[in-house]
Amino acid sequence: MTSVMNIFRALEGKWNFHRTISNYGIIRGVATFKKSAIESHLLHYREEGVLKRENGEHFQVYRDYLYRYKNNRISVFFPEKTERLLHVLEFLDATTAVARHVCSCDVYDATYNFSLEDEFELSYLVNGPSKGYLITTFFTRQLKG
């Protein structure tokens, strides 16, 4: 079994996450990677949390994605009627992957770090005509019990 397949399989389950959005705020919440009942190499990602802006405002937030393993690659899609690709993870080594998403004039460069068994990090460097910030998310697996 490849390390990419191992990483994909290890994502399944519940994770606590803490996200920092530079010059904007933080989000704390829970993310779940749930295996599809129809497609064995598909995980539905759902996160729910609370955004606390730097000005003190609080908001409930959520996000959904689909993670698919195919041909020794992990691809991430927006869960729309016709799936739309967010990005494909390109592994630089056994634990680090990069990906890029271009949205109009904005570029989202992602780095995934899977070096620890029950933790991983995802960071996005966002650049565009009116954007320039860093989003860093730390995930910690919830203990089964």
Image (cartoon, rainbow, N blue to C red):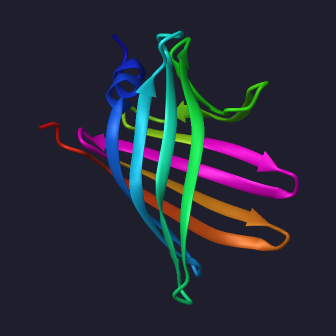
Image position of 39 with respect to 3: above or below: above
Query: Which residue is rendered at x = 37% and y = 15% of the image?
Result: 2
| Residue range highlighted in magenta | 99-119
Image position of 104 with respect to 145: above or below: below
Query: Which residue is rendered at x = 44% and y = 58% of the image?
Result: 137
Examine the image and state in which quarter residue 28 appears: bottom left
Query: Which residue is rendered at x = 55% and y = 83% of the image?
Result: 57
Image position of 56 with respect to 123: above or below: below
**Residue 101 lies in the magenta-colored region:** yes
**In the orientation shown, which residue stands out farthest toward the bottom?**
55
**Residue 145 lies in the magenta-colored region:** no
Q: How many marks?
A: 0
**Residue 12: percent from left, percent from top:** 36, 29
Front one among 140 and 120: 140
**Residue 6: percent from left, percent from top:** 34, 22
Image position of 23 with respect to 138: above or below: below
Q: Left or right: 9 with respect to 129?
A: left
The quadrant in which the C terminus is found is top left
Q: Left or right: 98 with respect to 49?
A: right
Label the magenta part by its dominant secondary structure. strand
Query: Which residue is rendered at x = 58% and y = 57% of the image?
Result: 124
**Residue 55: percent from left, percent from top:** 56, 90
**Residue 104: percent from left, percent from top:** 88, 52
Examine the image and state in which quarter residue 76 appears: top right
